[in-house]
Image: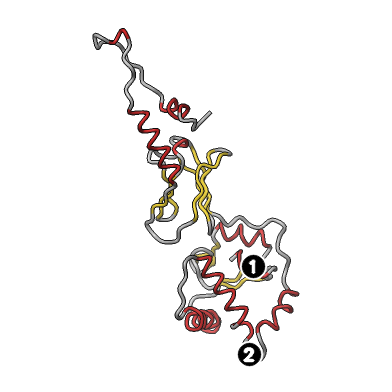
Amino acid sequence: HLWCLEDLGAVPRLGVYDGEAAISHRDRGKVVFTEAFLRFRGTLAMGAIVLAPGCPERKGLVERANGYLETSFLSGRDFSSPQDFNAQLGEWLATKANTRLHAGLRCRPSDRIAEDLGAMMALPPVAPDVALHADTRLGRDHWVRVGTNDYSVHPRAIGRRVHIRADANHVVVTWGTEEVARHARVWARHVTVSDEAHDQARRSRTALAAMPYPAGEDDEGGDAEVATRDLADYDRALGLVG
């Protein structure tokens, strides 16, 4: 949604929406906006209307637009990523859909864009934050889950509280001010995304932890007390922490 508005370069004074769980739900017939959408539209200073269920006149506008995209744009196309989808859609809208003579408008949609922009509001100086945020303690397997997908994190953050930020393009994990993971967002389901540097650090950490202590002079009888090594010592030995 934000990408579309930024690409357009303006904000409508009022957004009209079909019923979508990301935007709102109804409680005894009353529209209740989600907290995320309230932050979004509040930053944009934009009003919002959610169409009532079973309203054929209004819902027909939405469904006809979706049907037009499905039959005229999607047919015969392949997409490698959401970014590729948006790039192909943008080109198709600019060169075909918005330049054709529209029967209802009796003009080309591109002829109306300048007039519409003149009636809209300016984008805010600071864009709304539309990313997903979560805090968790990183387990010993050093993975975090976003949606149904697992993303690796550098094992130096094991046992620490980390912050996860996921937007449409990236999943970023930070420990304090330090970035301990950055991955391209995956939109497939049940995918494991790994960084080789994270895997190598975990293998080295495990190998060091498994190494025996060298025998001392007092260990001949087998009764000497053996100290328990803090795993942080291995991290320092590998240069993973200061």
Q: Which residue is mark 2?
A: 101
Q: Earlier in the sequence, mark 2 or mark 1?
A: 1
Relative to 127, 79 lies left or right: left
Frontmost residue, 217 versus 7: 217
Numbered disc in front, either 2 or 1: 2
Query: Given the image, on which type of amino acid does mark 2 rest?
Result: Leu
Q: Is residue 91 above or below residue 179?
A: below
**Split into 4 quadrants, where in the image is the N terminus?**
bottom right
- State whether residue 52 appears in this view: yes
**Residues marked 2 and 1 touching at CB (< 8 Å):** no
Going 74% across and 79% down the picture, which residue do you hit? 115
Going 37% across and 29% down the picture, which residue do you hit? 208
- Residue 236 in picture, x, y percent from top left: 48, 27
- Residue 146 in picture, x, y percent from top left: 45, 52
SS class, disc 1: helix
SS class, disc 2: loop
Relative to 14, 218 lies left or right: left
- Residue 170 in picture, x, y percent from top left: 52, 54
**Label 2 neighbour load within 10 Å: few <14, some 14-19, many 20+:** some
Q: Which residue is mark 1?
A: 5
- Residue 88 in picture, x, y percent from top left: 54, 73
Frontmost residue, 196 versus 130: 196
Relative to 140, 114 lies left or right: right
Query: Given the image, on which type of amino acid does mark 1 rest?
Result: Leu
Cα distance between the residues tagged 2 and 1: 24 Å
Q: Is residue 130 above or below residue 102?
A: above
